Amino acid sequence: MRRLPLSSMGIAPREDARWRQACEDRGFDYHSIDGAYWVDDTFYALSALEWGALQRATQTWKAMFEDATEELIAVGPRALSAIGIPDAWQRAVVRSWHAREPSLGWRWDTLWDGSHWRLLECNCSTWSGLLECVEPQRDWARDTGLHAPNTLLEDGRAWFAEHLSGAPLSAYALSTQRVEVATAQEVARWAGPSSRAVPLERLWRNGTTVEQTWGFKVAPWHWWFQRDPGHELPMGHAHWAMPLWTAMWHSKGFLVWVSELNQGEPTLIAADWSPLVGVGSPQQVRKPFWGAEGHGVERTGEKMAECVYQRFVDAPVEGKYPTIGAWCINGALSGLYMRECDGWKLDEWSRMLPYAVI
């Protein structure tokens, strides 16, 4: 994988005013937040072999996570508690898995170490970062003439057509979070003309709602857990596009189960409940169960509750540190989420770049 300026391909950068307006027309009006969020004149180039390897890796991870889920549930409440699922919610989580409630999908966050894709974590309880990976990425590929496999729109619409059968969807996001609201609006468009974005505050205020059978949320399940860990709160809908069992996969604690059951798997990064090396060693990363965008992630071995320890993998590309998010809808690779930063840890100021397979 390489980081390339468009000029290296003999392609002139797009006119700033034009691509910015196109993004805004798509609802992506935060393209230049914090100075430069979307980088339009540089991209990450994957080879066809790397793309094929990523497709295979996503299927490998899916199978491993499914097997680990069965193992964890077989152990019982102690195992669920260990990954951060509150006692009051455990029956509902297990019931959701046993019912095989369908999931729209998830995002595998990965690194490319030069030989293998390495799994950092799974984000499947919320879909932040989706909007900019759909039409803005496809517009960029069309305008530059570069090949960037991306079927997020088609796959998302097909999933909703299959499972909703024309029923409307309520897509929730906190009204104060413009990025999440834009994502909720995008997914509501996938689901059909009778679907709509709804403030998450309304669901929480009413407890139960709602006229719609199906819900989607740009909010993780642990927000529900933290609101009242001693009681299973009303969930508002009969069905969710990211069902309750996805909270298990979303917990960083689940990485320990997957790691222990698949020791030696080259696409995994070793994870454990305890420091992997010396307490003061920077060759490991401590992650809180429910962190996002690097919050609480540190290169340390100091003990902390509700955290896991993962081996540090140093994988810069052209002096930058990319995190490659592999969006999978209905279990298959549908598109990428490319974020980069100048240091080793992703944060809310990390840049978004397009990608191509060349």
Image (spheres, helix red, strand yellow):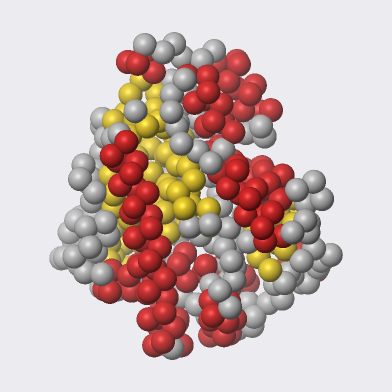
Q: Residue furthest right?
A: 211
Q: Is residue 339 left or right of residue 302?
A: right
* Count of residue discs: 0
Q: Quadrant of the C terminus?
A: top left
- Specify whether residue 254 is in view: yes
Residue 138 drawn at (x, y percent): 54, 30
Residue at 36%, 20% in the rendered image: 5
Q: Nearer the viewer, residue 57 or 231?
A: 57
- Quadrant hosting residue 278: bottom left
Q: Nearer the viewer, residue 313 or 168?
A: 168
Q: Is residue 9 left or right of residue 161?
A: left
Residue at 58%, 78% in the rendered image: 99
Relative to 321, residue 107 above or below: below
Residue 242 drawn at (x, y percent): 59, 63
Residue at 68%, 68% in the rendered image: 239
- Quadrant hosting residue 202: bottom right
Q: Quadrant of the N terminus?
A: top left
Residue 275 drawn at (x, y percent): 23, 69
- Specify whether residue 216 is in view: no
Residue 69 drawn at (x, y percent): 42, 75
Residue at 72%, 63% in the rendered image: 214
Relative to 118, residue 206 above or below: below
Relative to 283, residue 257 above or below: below
Q: Nearer the viewer, residue 261 or 81?
A: 261
